Amino acid sequence: LSNELGTKLLKKVLLDIHKVMIPQLENPLILADFLTDAYDFKDSLHVRMLALSGLFVLISKHNLDYPKYYQKLYGLLLPQEDNLHILNMKYRTRFLKLLELSLRSNQLPASLICAFIKRSMRIALQLPPNCIIWILPFVQNLFKRHPVCIKLIRKSPDKGTEEFETDPFKHLESDPEKSKATDSYMWELAILKRHYCPNIAKLAKNFEATIKNKNLLDLDDFSVVSLNDLFSDELEKTQKEAPMNFEAPNKFVQKNSAVELLY
């Protein structure tokens, strides 16, 4: 591991380092520098995610002190320079599991959780339905584990409609603690309620009702959903007859219609 590794070999090493190498070492913390250097490997988003996964094992099981962990994890949620997003790539399921495990502790500060909620909801506006269908239950579980963050779901005092005028949240801020997420509100949910995919719109409309149920959702059921699954689900639904007019016509040319006026 002291030698420089190519991208392909580095991926292969990192892919199983948590179950093949770390358990065999008397002092697994000697891998900390290797994993932090691997995260800085700019050529591959996969390498950075796998390196962070290894660091999480060292932090959670071997007491590694790595203050920048959540900042690094937060950074992976942003689209890259080439518009690629980790939720659209290989090892997506592994990243989703890492994200969920990392935010389970109820000892995490509300400002950190709010930042992850806001960034997750913001990227949901840009991602395909098979990614959003995992993000919404993930955010719901965060609200259930951290009820103090419920203030992000804020309603206008008069008509009950979401406020869109200003949002203090700094979406591109690299440090979640400086993102001002706690001063923000979750207007993105209102947009997702009008999503073109019926399954996404239904999830968004039932969002607040689902939060009231304290039972956590099983995210594994959502992480494997593909675009083909969503498309097939819509094809299997029994469609109601779509109305073509507000009033049923009783003759071919209606009174005072444009056709009657012309002819």
Image (cartoon, helix red, strand yellow):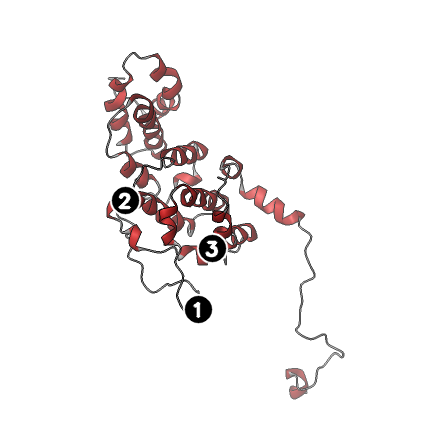
Quarter of the image for residue 184 reads: bottom left
Q: Mark 3 = which residue?
A: 192
Could you classify mark 2 by the number of other residues whose Cα lies within 10 Å: few (under 14), some (14-19), or many (20 or more)? many
Which residue is at a point 59% across and 46% down the rendered structure image?
A: 231
Quarter of the image for residue 52 reads: top left
Measured in 3D between alpha carbons, the distance from the residue under mark 3 to the one under mark 2, in whole angstroms, is 23 Å
Image height check: is 153 above or below 222?
below
Front: mark 1 or 2: 1
Image position of 220 (left or right of 29): right
Marks 3 and 2 close (CB-CB < 8 Å):
no
Q: Mark 2 = which residue?
A: 176
Task: Tell me the element at label 1.
Answer: loop
**What is the quadrant of the C terminus in the image?**
bottom right
Image position of 253 (left or right of 115): right
Rendered location of residue 93, percent (x, y): 45, 34
Marks 1 and 3 close (CB-CB < 8 Å):
no
For residue 49, the mark is: none
Could you classify mark 3 by the number of other residues whose Cα lies within 10 Å: few (under 14), some (14-19), or many (20 or more)? many
Quarter of the image for residue 243 reads: bottom right
| Residue type, label 3 | Leu
Instruction: Return the disc, 1 or 3, that comes first in the chain's sequence.
Output: 1
| Residue type, label 2 | Pro
Q: Mark 1 = which residue?
A: 159
Front: mark 1 or 3: 1
**What is the quadrant of the N terminus in the image?**
top left
Could you classify mark 1 by the number of other residues whose Cα lies within 10 Å: few (under 14), some (14-19), or many (20 or more)? few
Instruction: Return the disc, 1 or 2, that comes first in the chain's sequence.
Output: 1
Task: Tell me the element at label 2.
Answer: helix
| Residue type, label 1 | Lys
Measured in 3D between alpha carbons, the distance from the residue under mark 1 to the one under mark 2, in whole angstroms, is 32 Å
